[in-house]
Amino acid sequence: MLDREKLASAIGDRWSDSELNEAFALLARADGRFPAGVRSLPSGLIKAIQRERLLAAMIDGVAELGYNALTVQDVLARASISRPTFYEQFGDKEDCFLAAFDSAAARMRRRVETAAAEAGEDWQERLRGGLAELLRFIAEEPEEARAVIVEARASSPGGLRRRDELLDSFATCVDALVREELDEPPSAIAAAGVVGGIESVLYARLQKGEAKQLDELLPSLMYFAVLAYVGREAAVVQLDDAALA
């Protein structure tokens, strides 16, 4: 569910620490629901917190029940928010899910891209750094990862489009990363195949409830990715490095 750190990250610096602290103190004293007649906090802050709580409840609910079984009432119960307040923020269940997907996917992308950029100069080092962070994100945020990787497939045409757009964005990043260093420019289809293959593996593992054991996949995923670009001899090194680690 929503914590203070995620909230502060989501709503930015529009409100002060003292206002955020007061908001969380109010929620704690009122069992997660803003008490009626709150006047000391800006209405915009209250609405922003309610929105983030609904998104967190959507992530929690869809991870437990699945998109198709989840109802708006399930989200309301988890968020301790009224139905009229929900419909002030979102048009329907799908609208809320797409917003939750966007939020989770954005956090995933930021972490992966930052880790890749800081991992080193070589494209394989950067790719390894990004993949390692992706696996770490899944282990630390299994509900968000399930919403993005698993439930988006079963959600709606809009959810499927969001998923495809996310995969395309990762493929574009991988293609650009590799293209910078290889003498012969690779086909862009190679990146789409690599990203799609990795996503399929992660989907299968998450379906089995194995989010916490994914770090062991890093050598195999790197082997698969490197193989697509520079062949088996270079790819085997990824497995050898893992054995020596």
Image (cartoon, helix red, strand yellow):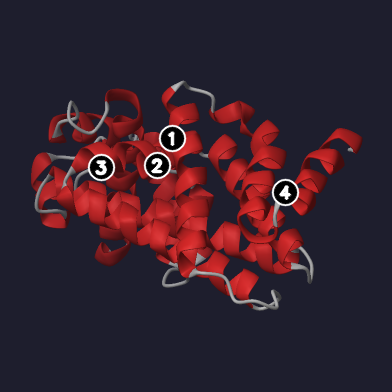
Q: Which residue is mark 4?
A: 232
Pointer 4 or 2: first along the chain: 2
Q: Which residue is mark 2?
A: 149
- For mark 3, give the secondary structure: loop
Q: Position of residue 203 (x, y in %)?
A: 43, 35
Q: Nearer the viewer, residue 118 or 46?
A: 118
Q: Nearer the viewer, mark 2 or mark 3?
A: 2
Q: Position of residue 144 (x, y in %)?
A: 43, 41
Cα gap from disc 1 to disc 3, whole angstroms = 41 Å
How crowded is the residue under tag 1: few (<14 C-alpha within 10 Å), some, or many (20+)? many
Residue 155 in view, yes or no: yes
Cα gap from disc 4 to disc 2, whole angstroms = 28 Å
Pointer 1 or 3: first along the chain: 3
User: Residue at coordinates 24% horizontally, 49% vertically from top-left?
Assistant: 159
Label 1 sits on what residue type? Answer: Tyr
Q: Quadrant of residue 243?
A: top right
Q: Nearer the viewer, mark 3 or mark 4?
A: 4
Number of numbered discs: 4
Cα gap from disc 2 to disc 3, whole angstroms = 36 Å
Pointer 2 or 3: first along the chain: 3
Q: Nearer the viewer, residue 123 or 49?
A: 123
The quarter of the picture where the N terminus appears is top left
User: Residue at coordinates 31% horizontally, 50% vertically from top-left?
Assistant: 100
Q: Along the horizontal axis of the image, is 185 left or right of 26?
A: right
Residue 21 in view, yes or no: no
Q: Are marks 4 and 2 in contact (CB under 8 Å)?
A: no
Q: Which residue is mark 1?
A: 203
Q: Quadrant of residue 151?
A: top left
Q: Is residue 29 above or below residue 191?
A: above
Label disc, if present, on residue 35 of the rendered structure:
3
